[in-house]
Amino acid sequence: MTQPPDQPPHGGFGAPQDQPPGPGGFGTAQPPPAPGAFGAPQAPQAPPAQAGFGAPQPPAAPPQPQPGYGYPQQPGPYGAAPGPYGQPQPGPYGQQQPRPYGYPQQAPQQPGPYGAPQAGYGQPPQPPYPGMPGIPGAAPGGPASRKKTALIIGSAVAALLVIGGTVFAVTGGGDEGGGGKKPVARHSDGPEHSATSSPTTSGGADPDHLNDGRGPGEAKVLWYAPAPDAPASGADAPGMWITGDTAVKAAYKQVFAFGTGDGRTAWGPLSLPQKICAVTPRQSADDKVVVAYMSGAGEHAKCNQLQQLDLRTGEKGWSGEVADGGLFDSALTIELTVSGKTLMVGRSQSGTAYDIDSGKKLYDKKRYGAACFPAAYAGGTDRLIQVSSCGVGTSGEHEELQELDPANGAVRWTQKLKKGWEVSRAYSVDPLVVYLTNRDKKTWNISSFTKDGKFRSEVTVDEKFAPRCGWAILERELQGCQGVAVDADTLYLPTDATVSANEIVAVGLADGKEKWRVKSPSDRPMYPLKTEGGKLVAYVQPSYDTGGQVVSVPTAGSAHRTTALLRNPQGAADVEGAFYDGVLDWTGGRLFISSGRLSGDDDSKEKLIMAFGN
């Protein structure tokens, strides 16, 4: 995610709306999603608080008054009486929407994202952009009492430990990285090295004794690496990419690569002239990513310098500078999105697309229609979604969802939302599932759409959900949420929990109704990671005396019980739960956890990345 220099760290495993930190770890209390915008009544909810792996959270602004439980229930946008399914009523996109099955008659009414009345469940007013600090209604507790953990799903084949510039592996010898130079203007011959925090592998070492006293059936820490030097104020460590036998991690001004099997240095580390401020959340099909770094160290520096990297080799590819888009459309902060072979660079009011392999500019997306400005992007394998703000400050103010052809920017379809509704997050791009908020009405909803952009369903489950999303300061970062999973027919959402057991609810995308739910197998919260092989894979947060777990749940049939895939050692529980803005990746039977932000505390023995396996 992007953020201007010296901004508060990104949020943890993000609630639908980014919220100020509250007590707890991976399952810290989160504001419940406001009433299902698609029809089913829900109890009033407070906004979700940020959760994480255990690191301190940025301070929250004082909470403001808000309606609590008992706030009047109201019909959803598609289920008002008289219902849009019996009488004409404009939907969010100007269509008539069918009435959800079993939707109860209710009053009073509020306009929903698609034109039908929306339930107001006491959700507190939302910030101008999701994740902005100071959102009222956070759970009690301060930074000292919170843990921030977020997950990224991927594959890991081994793990190593890195302490004080050394990567410690359970087995194996080591390589050393050496010297350093700055990136070139265009193509370089190969990976470059840095003398700062260059990891070294030491076979058989475990200086923190994280594997001591492992019980029967417990996995082990395979390897780990210490965090590189960072300013006392902290530094971003965004992204984590797993490709083949290499795990790649960005931190402060460097990009590190480790062998997934033994944690040895795969290449690099690569050094950049200034601190990293944005990365592509996913790699291209041929394992290319783009990293953005600041134009300088001063207070007027912008996040506008791009560097392409090959994850397999560490080779630096093309580089360039993002130009400002015009008045009120600067590159102070940017967001990077990958769709197919297209890199979309989003500014505050426009976007520019490049070929991610060559750096060739493909097209610009600028103002169109009735003062519509591109505001955010989300990308998938072959889909590129654009969110635009239109007619700001006028009576016709609204937002629009569009799908673009990634290759040429042509608009495939457009859907118009009713005034007051904002697209805050994209839980999935294919199928498209978005989280919307209405600050004036203090409500939210979760909607899904067909391949051609038609409204498919809205979540109608009366529940408080709490996926984890990062801080979005000046950019929305549509794809900044973890702890939520989607397959072709089902959305998997975690219920709200502070430190106790919660549930994962499977919601059908065909009708927005609950299909089944499963409870955490321990007394700690559980969060979806991904779906694979007909199963949902989830992560269970560690407690003070128990390591975290990776579990699976069958998605079909009638028996939905958790089966342990990996039980992390108790001796590593404290470290596992302390990754700041943690990022998780599960693949090939191994779990990677890395920090999303460095504290800069030289005495904390902070870890950058850790791998668990059997």
Image (spheres, grey):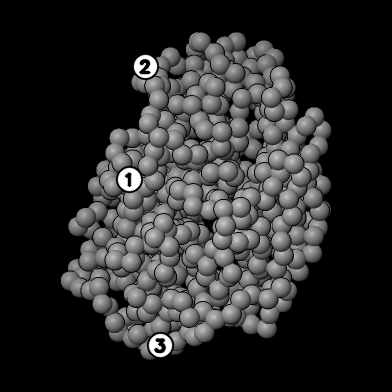
The foreground one among 351 and 386 is 351
Give residue 601's position: percent from left, percent from top: 34, 62
Q: Is residue 263 above or below residue 447?
A: below
Report if the CB atoms under discs 1 and 2 are less than 8 Å apart: no
Q: Dot 3 corresponds to which residue? A: 174
Q: Is residue 294 above or below residue 122?
A: below
Q: Is residue 6 left or right of residue 166?
A: right
Q: Dot 2 corresponds to which residue? A: 70
Q: Residue at x 43, y 14 (%)?
A: 72
**Mark 1: which amino acid?**
Pro
Give residue 215's position: percent from left, percent from top: 19, 68
The image quarter containing residue 381 is bottom right
Give residue 587's position: percent from left, percent from top: 46, 66
**Which numbered disc, 3 or 2, marks the residue closer to the eye?**
3
Quadrant (top left, top right, bottom left, bottom right) of the C terminus: bottom left
Q: Dot 1 corresponds to which residue? A: 143
Mark 3 Cα-neighbour bin, 10 Å: few <14, some 14–19, many ≥20 = some
**Which numbered disc, 3 or 1, marks the residue closer to the eye?**
1
Q: Residue at x 67, y 51 (%)?
A: 331
The foreground one among 300 and 352 is 300
